[in-house]
Amino acid sequence: MTSHHHPASAAPDASSTDAAATAEQPQAPTEFWEELYTAKPTVWSGRVNANLASVAGTLTPGRALDLGCGEGGDAIWLAQQGWRVTGIDISTVAIERARAAARAARVDGSLVDFVAGDLETWRPAEPLDLVTASFFQSPVHLPRTQILREAARMLAPGGHLLTVAHAGPPSWVENSEHPAHLFVHPEREIDELALPADEWETVIAELRTREVTSPDGAPGTLEDSVVLLRRLR
């Protein structure tokens, strides 16, 4: 996923999905992501998402799930901090690359596990302490809110749900080039999740700006939505 996510600097170019969108049948998410990963030897940087690192770095390691883990950058970083992590993605190509990256990083095999599976149906064997979803936004249909809500139920009391999402297009891109549904604002994220107020507290809900280099080499910025929710009971 563009995790999702992921240690990604930007969502896949929306124009690449135009052909699929105009076909009579919308493209299935699995097919879309397999094609995206197969088309390039690597899609993401392999580095941990900076916002995930700054937030998760303050939490006590336990059991974690990385939704839409892509090529594994975030999950590998979490394992290196002592979390026991499962990274899940619908793309088998991404998962193969994540496993190879974990081996290359010499991560303890008991700390990280990568699963190619359906995010809507996969369930952990025991309650989790952290669920992360970085850039878990898909140009093709994916029931994002539903998946996040189900994942929140997998958390033990005291566990955290952390989402990092694109809040808008890159500074060098016109708004009209990307469909609005690809962007998430913190307040909307919390409203749509609609988790019971007596069971959850909002720890972080903010927009964060990142300085990046645009494709033509000029300085640019990206705006991210960062939400951290804690399960109380």
Image (cartoon, grey):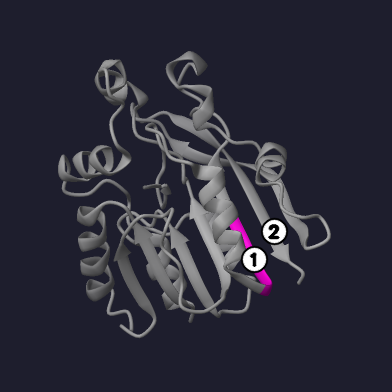
The reply, left or right, for residue 56 in relation to residue 136 is: right
Asked if the stretch drawn in magenta spans residue 3, the answer is no
Question: What is the magenta segment's predominant secondary structure?
Answer: strand
Q: Which quadrant holds the C terminus? A: bottom right
Inter-mark Cα distance, 2 to 1: 5 Å
- Closer-to-camera residue (191/202): 191
Q: Nearer the viewer, residue 104 or 88?
A: 88
Q: Is 7 rendered above or below residue 20?
A: below
Q: Residue at x 52, y 60 (%)?
A: 132
**Image mark for residue 35:** none
Residue range in magenta is 157-162
Q: Is residue 71 left or right of residue 5?
A: left
Specify the amino acid type for callout 2: Leu
Q: Is residue 233 above or below residue 54?
A: below
Question: Is 39 located above or below residue 107 in the figure?
Answer: above
Q: Quadrant of residue 102?
A: bottom left
What numbered label is drawn on residue 229? 2
Label 2 vs 1, first from the N-terminus: 1
Q: Is residue 207 left or right of residue 12?
A: right
Residue occupied by mark 1:
160
Q: Residue at x 83, y 60 (%)?
A: 198
Position in image of residue 230 (x %, y %): 71, 64
Residue 67 appears at what percent x and percent y?
Answer: 44, 57
- Residue 159 lies, in percent from the top left, at 65, 71
Label 2 with label 1: CB-CB less than 8 Å: yes
